[in-house]
Amino acid sequence: MLEKAAKELALWDDPEYVASQARARLHFVFPGERQYIVVGNDEITNTGQQTKVSEQLPIGLPWYSRLIASITSTNVNR
């Protein structure tokens, strides 16, 4: 068990290992790089039941309330 801990500690002395762990665990990127995170593996299908969220929101709300409501009300049926 002590050998395993010593091996893992030795890995953290390698700058490339630290960089790979920062990328994998914390989603870090180097300056000038872009990172894209793809969430979900489901195929998007057109169900024909799509309605515009803007038509469902009450009129007269401030723009920021409408924005928050549109974000929280999307994908409710998922």
Image: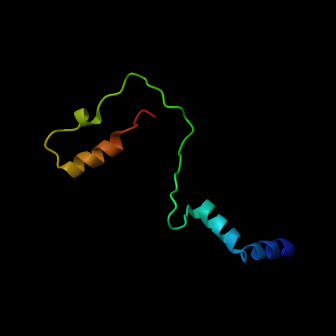
Q: Residue 48 placed where, x, y %? A: 39, 21
- The answer to whether 35 is drawn above or below residue 11 in the figure is above
**Between 65 and 45, which is closer to the camera in this rendering?**
45
At horizontal 52% and vertical 56% (from top left) the residue drawn is 35
Q: Residue 73 placed where, x, y %? A: 34, 40
Q: Residue 76 placed where, x, y %? A: 39, 36
Q: Residue furthest top?
A: 48
Q: Quadrant of residue 58?
A: top left
Q: Residue 55 placed where, x, y %? A: 23, 33
At horizontal 55% and vertical 64% (from top left) the residue drawn is 28
- The answer to whether 4 is drawn above or below residue 69 in the figure is below
Q: Is residue 56 left or right of residue 39?
A: left
Q: Is residue 4 left or right of residue 69?
A: right
**Between 39 and 76, which is closer to the camera in this rendering?**
39
Q: Residue furthest left?
A: 60
Quadrant of image for the N terminus: bottom right
Q: Is residue 57 left or right of residue 32?
A: left
Colour mode of the rendering: rainbow
At horizontal 55% and vertical 35% (from top left) the residue drawn is 42
